[in-house]
Amino acid sequence: MKKIKDPRVARRLRIKRGLKKRIFGTTQKPRLSVFRSNTSIYAQIIDDVQGKTLVGCSSRNKSLINEKLTKTELSRLVGKMLAEKALQAGITEVVFDRNGFTYHGRVKALADGAREGGLKF
């Protein structure tokens, strides 16, 4: 395996490995996985049993690109949009996977937006 030089990335990946032991998405309760980059935030709902992504959404969505919002406000909107898509697909409960990111700021805003949209976790 390639050695990661940036200590922050290595720390996040080490935390992520520990979380993967405990977090698993089933058909009844899929996993809501979050990835945060410097500019964007991505979220998808995954069924780990079948290995398929059921619903996905990101801040790179065409309807959100022209919005003049902060990254945190944009994350909340992504969470709401993801929740709407999930409810249309018949998903009401999920397991939250923060992917090793600290649960504050944009990750927390996405989770709050998803809860506002109607998802339970």
Image (cartoon, rainbow, N blue to C red):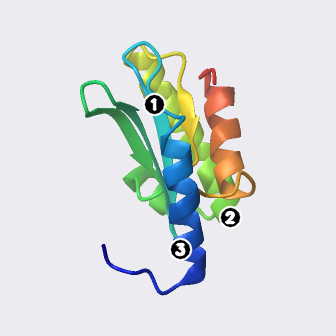
Which quarter of the picture shows residue 8? Answer: bottom right
Q: CA distance from mark 2 to mark 1?
A: 31 Å
Up the image or down, 51 lies above or below 103; here it is above
Left/right of residue 50 with respect to residue 10 in the rendered view: left
Which amino acid type is marked by label 1?
Phe
Which quarter of the picture shows residue 26? Answer: top left
Task: Write the residue at 68% across / 64% down.
Answer: 70
Up the image or down, 91 lies above or below 56; here it is above
- In the image, residue 66 lies at what x, y percent? 49, 63
Left/right of residue 55 with respect to residue 84 in the rendered view: left
- In the image, residue 24 lies at what x, y percent? 45, 30
Up the image or down, 79 lies above or below 105; here it is above
Which amino acid type is marked by label 3?
Val
Q: Secondary structure at mark 1?
A: loop
Task: Write the residue at 42% across / 44% down.
Answer: 57
Whether residue 7 is visible: yes
Which numbered tag is attached to residue 24? 1
Q: Quadrant of the N terminus?
A: bottom left
Residue with the mark numbered 2: 70
The answer to whether the residues at label 3 and label 1 have Cβ atoms under 8 Å apart is no
Which numbered tag is attached to residue 9? 3
Q: Secondary structure at mark 2?
A: loop
Q: Secondary structure at mark 3?
A: helix
